[in-house]
Amino acid sequence: MKHFLIFIVTLVSNAIFSCGFYPSGEDLRYSFLDPLHFKYYSYSDFNYSSNSFSPSEDSIGKELTIDGNEKLWIAYCQNKVSVDAIRKVLLEIDSKEINPQSSNEMIRYLYQSKDFEAVDYLKFAKSCEFFNGIYDDPWERKQMLVTPKRTKLIDKAIAVSNKITNKELKLRYTFLAIRLAYYNNDYATIRTLYDGVFKLEKNVQILNYWSLYFRTFAETDLALANYYAAQVFANAPDKRFMISGEYNRNVSINEVLKYANTNQEKANVYLLAGIKKTDQSLEYLKQIYKYNPEFEGLSFLLLREINKIEDWVFTPYYSLFSPSLSSYDDIQKNSIHDIMNRVERDRNYADQLLKFVNSVNFKKVDNILLWKICQAYLHFMTKDNQGCLSQISLLEKQISKSDPLYNQLEIIKALALTANQPKNEAVILEEVKPILLKNKNYKKFVFAIGRELEYKGNTTDAAFLYSKLNDKEADDDSYYNAAYWKNSKIKATYYTDYCSDYFDYINMFYSPLQVEKMVEEITNNKKDSDEFYVWKNTFIKNELPRLYDLIGTKYIRQNNLQRALFYFAKNEDKKEYKIDYSECLWEKEDCDGVYKNPFFVLKYTPGFVSQNNLFKLNKYAVTQQLISCLEKASNPKEKDRDYFYFLAANCYYNMTFYGSLPEMRRYGWQVQIIENPVEDNDEFYECNLAQKYYLVALKNAKTNKFKALCLRMIGKCEKNKLVHQFPNDYDNRIENYDNFILKKNKYYQDLKSKYSDDYEDLISDCNAFEEYFKSRR
């Protein structure tokens, strides 16, 4: 609910940010199956991510593999030259270094073999390197110099290609001409050269696909261009990232498939189409399996689909946020109920994928282990925890414990074991403890185990695990190593609806009893020799004073003053801060840390009683004094019952949003009304208890002036209640809002009708309060 009142609220101290950062994308995404462990490095630019496709540091080059061009040169040199020597010629040396005196193994071989045509080719290729790029010149100073030179190189490459008899060098010169033509924006030459040379080649190798890469850009038929792009994507790993951008998803895949002549080409089309899909790709997986089951692209696409479902299921299930790829509009319009309904639909989709995986002949696929791990994981995704655990027990025997994949299995196993426990009987199982210790810095995993426990009713262990998110020992260099989450009860608006801190979460959503159980766990169990116990308690054992204060604060919210006093007493020196009735505290600008006496002083209101001393208050002292006031006021023999009821009402008022001591109920600085799922939310904004005791004070008042003052304060509480119940929303503005609220305030109307001579003094000038307070006798 948006309120027109210009306040800013912070119910919790760290988790809520009024502007700026809001978790999204990779901050939120849950993924327990790391694609890097399966070593599809040449596809790593296309690992599922909310960042869409981006060049990856883990792509080609992660392993020192030999690419297609290097293999051609190795074969050309009769396997007598090392790949390192070839790589250095291709990537490092310039044309001047290509001479008979070179120390490079490849160059020496070519000169010794008297292969001067190859030497000339290398020199020519080096001379073209500068022109293999688009040099935009906004001032148009050098463009006319570059283009003619590039054109001359194209003509020379074509001429040599037509003349030379060496078949491989002929193709290389043609490729150079095609590449130069691309940067010269000469698509006609690209089409002529490719269609006249490479398209006719039966022995297809990397030069064909490099040339087809440029041919794709020159194609005007969108379906044919998609077909070309798919073939390049499948066969030229170094071109994958750039060529993927040329695949037009608006073109029907059936139109593209018309150009595919072989099953392998059809599988290639389905692969790129599947990778470009951000939604379900199961049908494409089935088609690739049909046409080319041994294709490594099939296994990669399965892995990518698993990572998608993780995001669709686990991101919302654990965090209650929308999946990481959701748009801002989706986040705004989807309620948590809608999000969880989608989770169930996506679990059903996971079941469909599982059925497909079960139907696959694993002997035909290129990575059997990947398929079996995905199979086990899909059982967990579909809530078949026992089926997941059964398959993991078999897989554990097939994988070395030193293999990173083994830890991946253990993480899934820990989640399945925890989720497999009955409601209200879940604990951190002995088998799960070492897995948590091993992955103690993996915050999303630690949180996920906690969340499973919370869903099963074990809020105590859940909170202990959530507290580890605050532990500095769990921090590492991982950019997205954090957990952000919501609760289904929260009603706050965008930017104020999530937590990232355990204390903020239990402050909002745990009952006093639940926090008491946490304290009991800390104080009663002393297992210093237990490694897991020590780890679990490392952070939270130092939080005891804070937890005592929180329990006391929660009892204040319930108006259970005796229980609140009991817990506040565990932290405070009860003698030092005792309040004397003869003292009235006033907050001076030069008195740091001095609070207003909540019994005598109202925010923005001059004092009722002169001040003798300054005291530093705490929650224990305020609670103790409130209990004392109420006890005296409830005593029929007490002659000043109206006085003590009035003081108690003042204290209750000061503990609200409008008072001077809201920290009795809240943590953090608060300056805006925002609805939150704290049990005293209405009390905090409506001053109901204050109004109750002002009414009793009015009933016991002896003089008209004091009755008028009581009625004025009752009306003040009523105004706050009306502002809360009838907010002047941005989307629903109320004209003449102040008059609207005033007309609804029956107590101000009573004040005006019963005490007309005092109405203006009390409504318009708070300075009159002192006079009216002193007139109670």
Image (cartoon, grey):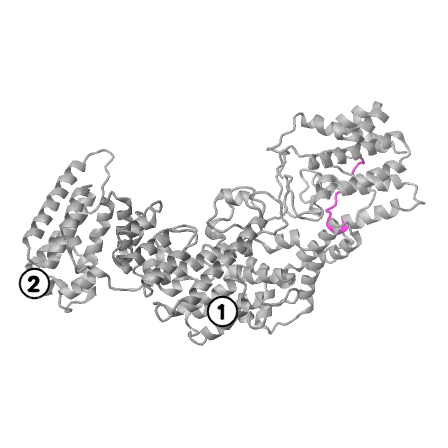
**Position of 670 relative to 512 (above/below):** above
Region rendered in magenta: 608-621
Which secondary structure, mark 1? helix
Name the residue nearer the viewer: 210 or 485: 210
Q: Position of residue 601 (x, y in %)?
A: 76, 38
Q: Where is residue 310 in the image (x, y as percent from the top left)?
A: 48, 58
Q: Is residue 617 magenta?
A: yes
Farthest right residue?
637
Name the residue nearer the viewer: 465 or 359: 359
Q: Does the magenta stretch include residue 151?
A: no
Label 2 sits on residue? 111
Q: Position of residue 525 (x, y in %)?
A: 67, 69
- Residue type, mark 2 in image: Tyr
Query: Where, by quadrant of the figure, is residue 426 drawn?
Result: bottom right
Which secondary structure, mark 2? helix
Residue drawn at x 33%, y 50% is 253
Count residues near mark 2 (Cα–Cα under 10 Å), then give few for <14, some for 14-19, many for 20+: some
Please, what is the dominant secondary structure of the magenta stretch? loop
Residue drawn at x 11%, y 54% is 123
Query: Where, by quadrant of the figure, is residue 646 drawn?
Result: top right
Label 1 sits on residue? 410
Q: Quadrant of the C terminus?
A: top right
